[in-house]
Amino acid sequence: MTTLASFYMHMGTGHWLLMALGLLVLVAVLFWLGTTLAGEKHTGGEAPSEELSALHLLDRRLAQGEITVEEREDARRVLAGEREHARA
């Protein structure tokens, strides 16, 4: 009988349970690490600014036909004006 086989034959129930628990903890930590890193890459690490969000919303509404090109440009000018006043 090899040394490894001898080792496994002499492991008691407590050792098997401890080994299984350790494996579950390892899998859980790896899963958490993977989802955390994937979440940061997906969002880009930063929340978009309000200015970009507003322009993105205008573009989406234009693409869906909810507003006209003129309405989008008027709204963009208003947003640009608000940014100018906020910087002053």
Image: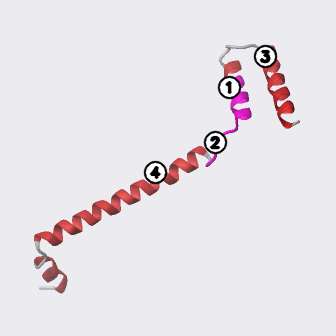
Mark 3 or mark 4, which is nearer the start of the sequence?
A: 4
Query: Can you tell which mark lies on residue 57?
Result: 1
| Relative height, residue 55 to residue 71 (above, below) | below
Q: How far apart are the two marked residues, 4 and 3, measured between alpha carbons?
A: 40 Å
Q: Residue at x 52, y 47 (%)?
A: 39
Disc 3 is placed on an element classified as helix
Closer to the camera in the image, 14 or 68:
14
The colour scheme applied to this rendered structure is: secondary structure
Mark 4 or mark 1, which is nearer the start of the sequence?
A: 4
Task: Using a 10 Å C-alpha cutoff, classify the residue at mark 3 as few (fewer than 14 neighbours), some (14 to 19) or many (20 or more).
Answer: few
Mark 4 or mark 2, which is nearer the start of the sequence?
A: 4
Viewer-nearest of discs 2 and 4: 2
Query: Can you tell which mark lies on residue 35?
Result: 4
Look at the numbered discs 2 and 4 and tell me whether their residues touch, using CB distance below 8 Å: no
Q: How far apart are the two marked residues, 3 and 1, measured between alpha carbons?
A: 13 Å
Look at mark 3 in the image and give the residue it sits on.
69
Q: Quadrant of residue 67?
A: top right
Look at mark 2 in the image and give the residue it sits on.
47
Look at the numbered discs 2 and 3 and tell me whether their residues touch, using CB distance below 8 Å: no
Question: Where's residue 32, x and y in %?
Answer: 42, 54
Magenta segment, which residues? 45-59
Q: How far apart are the two marked residues, 1 and 2, measured between alpha carbons?
A: 15 Å
Question: Where's residue 62, x and y in %?
Answer: 71, 19
Viewer-nearest of discs 4 and 3: 4
In this rendering, would 64 be left or right of 33? right
Mark 3 or mark 2, which is nearer the start of the sequence?
A: 2
Disc 4 is placed on an element classified as helix
Question: Where's residue 34, x and y in %?
Answer: 46, 55
Q: How far apart are the two marked residues, 2 and 4, measured between alpha carbons?
A: 18 Å
